[in-house]
Amino acid sequence: MLAKRVTDKLRAIFGDDGVLLSDVELMAYEYDAGVDRRRPDAVVFPTRKEQVVEVVKLAGAEGVPFVARGAGTNLSGGSIPAKGGLIVEFARMNRILELDIPNQRAVVEPGVINLDLNAALAEHGYFYAPDPASQKVSTMGGNVGENSGGPHCLKYGVTTNHVLGLEVVLPDGELARFGGKAFDAPGYDLTGLFVGSEGMFGLVTEITVRILRQPEAVKTLLAVFNTIEDAADSVSAIIARGILPATLEMMDKAVMEVVEASFHCGYPLDAEAVLIAEVDGLRDGLERLAESITEICRAHRAREVRAAKDAAEAAQLWAGRRGAFGAIARLSPGYLTMDGTVPRTELPRVLRGSLAIGRKYGLRAANVFHAGDGNLHPLLLFDERDPAQAEAAHLAAMEILALCASAGGTITGEHGVGLEKRAAMPLVFSEADLDAQKKVRAAFDPTGLCNPGKMFPD
């Protein structure tokens, strides 16, 4: 519990309507989209960067931990207040500050919703490429913290490839700027260091991103397979041919069943897997690319490959993919999501292995993932009200991450380490590696108050 002098100062900074203190109000902020829970001592809602500076200085003076939060869609416990203290909720800092169309740049506050930025850019014929599946609700600040990817990261890259500058409040309350609108700013790449730092180096108050012209044409394909191995082999074959689709997404039978029940996308319920492939670019030549992908899929025993007839049909196919995580509630009251990443050629083996691990622990597993870059999302279905099931899910998750690491992969592709995967860090880093990372963290946050308890094993 915070001392009264601290809560009085919080009200002075944010006003009565900018501070939450009651147990009922704080319950809504004790969890994100992962499975961990910790209740904060207070939640504050800044509307301008000066308030962020003030609250960080107050937290430092009082020794109070603080955590940045946006929409709470984080899947690894990254926005959970592991040590209590303050949540700095950026939902009210949600302005698009500038759309610099001639220079292909946009400047936004951290609470801007990813899809809202894209809606504003669409009016000018532009888009922001990183598109996490949660883009309808996830915020740009959270995307920066986790270095979010999404279906289009195969061709366009992840968040770090599109963030050019940041304004941040460091853990001592200093307001700093890194990078800007120009490429290749001189000095250390502190912008790149902050992207993906999981909110442990400071709080982002402004983000400068590059934007892209919308492609002239888009072609969306659905390939249907009788085995998940054939679908995975097709992914490697497409890339090996020198074709770089905008997206290559895979869903297995379990996911298709619940998605079809929720969204009626037209997925075949008797198939074991489908691939959604999208190619974009100049209209000339796009049809040939689509035909090449179709040929490769059929060579790998796809029983059917069909192209969306128009934008509406393509959007319906994507509605199922983007809504898959929510639809899983039809199967289970809870699930644990992994996002290990492996070389594409290892996809068939690791997929088989992850399903076998689920069976070993008596858990049903479902798969929906970014197949093009080997980023797996096995969903382990369980009821968190049953301690035995919860323990089994966590044990199975660690085995799946170990399998990914042994296949030459890593423990997270886009969801971050957070609370959930701390114990898995030694699978891919030595003690010396971890010590080096801790020293970098300490250089920014020597007191350890900024999002403590994350990433590093206890």
Image: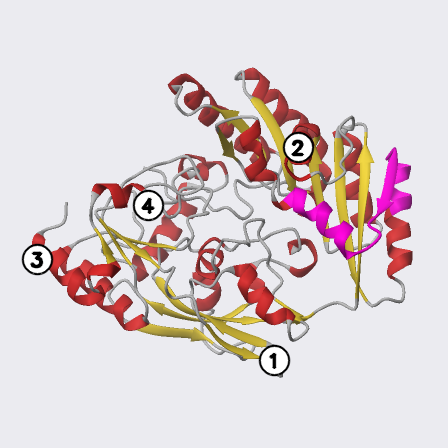
Q: Residue furthest bottom?
A: 102
Q: Give the CA separation, mark 2 to mark 1.
A: 41 Å
Which SS class for mark 1? loop
Q: Is residue 399 visible?
A: no
Q: Residue 110, position in %: x, y?
A: 42, 64
Which comes before the other along the chain, label 3 or label 4?
3
Query: Mark 4: few, some, or many residues within 10 Å (few <14, many ≥20)?
Result: many
Check disc 3 and report its element: helix, strand or loop: helix
For the image, the number of numbered tags is 4
Check disc 2 and give the amino acid type.
Ala
CA separation, marks 4 and 1? 37 Å
192 relative position to 253: left or right? left
Q: How is the image coloured?
A: secondary structure
Q: Looking at numbered disc 3 in the image, what kind of residue is underneath it?
A: Arg
| Start-end of magenta stretch | 294-321
Q: Quadrant of residue 83?
A: top left
* Disc number placed over residue 5 in the picture, else none: 3
- Between circles 4 and 2, the one closer to the viewer is 2
The three-letter code of the residue at mark 1 reads: Ile
**Element at label 2:** helix
The amino acid type found where label 4 is placed reads Tyr
Query: Looking at the image, is mark 2 or mark 1 nearer the viewer?
Result: 2
Overall secondary structure of the magenta section:
helix
Circle nearer the N terminus (3, 1) = 3
* Residue drawn at point x = 62 percent, y = 20 percent: 356
Location of residue 88 in the rendering, given as x and y in whole percent from the top left corner: 30, 57
Callout 3–callout 2 Cβ contact below 8 Å: no
**First reached walking from the N terminus: tag 4 or tag 1:** 4
Indicate whether 233 appears above or below 106.
above
Which residue was labeled with disc 2?
261
* Residue assigned mark 4: 29
* Residue where numbered disc 1 is placed: 101
